[in-house]
Amino acid sequence: MPHPVNDFIIPEKVVTDDKQLEKRIRAAINEWAAGYKIDAFKHLGDEISIEKMAL
């Protein structure tokens, strides 16, 4: 018999204060966006608002 879905929920760990992680996320977004050759995307990672980061 299958387990209930609740048995597989993993609680998240909020890491919003991890500035190094935020910096890496922004850099990754900028690298991804640069591939589109659209000026509005050029610094997308720097321009977005990151409200919450969780693992």
Image (cartoon, rainbow, N blue to C red):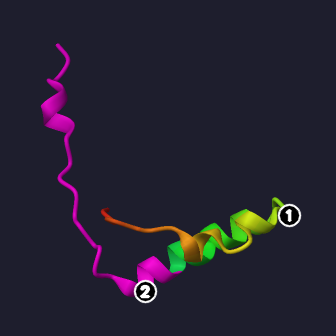
Camera-side residue: 50 or 28?
50
Residue 29: say if magenta: no
Which residue does the image show at 81% across and 59% down from the upper left? 36
Q: Along the line of sight, which residue is nearer the eye, 35 or 3? A: 35
Q: Earlier in the sequence, mark 1 or mark 2?
A: 2
Farthest residue, direction right = 37
Residue at screen point 67% across, 74% down: 43
Q: Amino acid at mark 1?
A: Lys
Q: Nearer the viewer, residue 3 or 40?
A: 40
Q: Name the element at disc 1.
A: loop
| Residue under numbered circle 2 | 20
Using the image, tell me which numbered label, if any, was put on residue 37.
1
Quarter containing the C terminus = bottom left
- Mark 1 crowd level (few <14, some 14–19, many ≥20, 10 Å Cα): few
CB under 8 Å between callouts 1 and 2? no
Amino acid type of the residue that numbered disc 2 sits on in the rendered structure: Gln
